[in-house]
């Protein structure tokens, strides 16, 4: 941590931030993105089916 002394004698501590990692365009880490996309689409499809079933039974 970097510590500086301000006017009036107060100490101010600045945290050290981690270095940034720059990824190349189009490069993804693992297949987690595809799994989340497919899971999200499946969830939306199930929710739409449930909503259609509920609206059909209560109409």
Image (cartoon, rainbow, N blue to C red):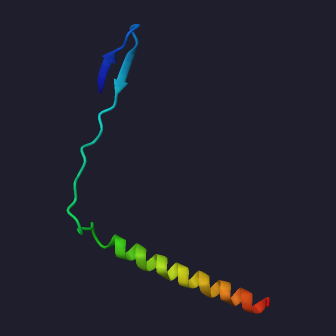
Residue appearing at x 35%, y 76% in the figure: 34
Please, which residue is most extreme toward the top here?
8
For residue 3, above or below residue 43: above
Which quadrant: the C terminus? bottom right
Q: Position of residue 42 (x, y in %)?
A: 49, 82
54 sits left or right of 32 in the view: right
The answer to which quarter of the image holds residue 14 is: top left
Q: Position of residue 24 (x, y in %)?
A: 20, 62
For residue 14, above or below residue 25: above
Q: Position of residue 41 (x, y in %)?
A: 48, 80
The answer to which quarter of the image holds residue 30 is: bottom left
Which quadrant: the N terminus? top left
Residue appearing at x 76%, y 91% in the figure: 57
Label tally: 0
4 sits left or right of 38 in the view: left
56 sits left or right of 13 in the view: right
Residue appearing at x 31%, y 73% in the figure: 31
Q: Position of residue 58 (x, y in %)?
A: 79, 88
Residue appearing at x 60%, y 81% in the figure: 47
Please, which residue is most extreme toward the right here?
59
């Amino acid at each position: 941590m970097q510590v500086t002394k301000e006017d009036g004698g107060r100490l101010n501590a600045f945290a050290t931030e981690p270095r940034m990692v720059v990824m190349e365009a189009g490069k993804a880490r693992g297949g987690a993105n595809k799994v989340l996309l497919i899971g999200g689409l499946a969830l939306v499809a199930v929710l739409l089916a449930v909503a259609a079933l509920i609206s059909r039974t209560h109409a």
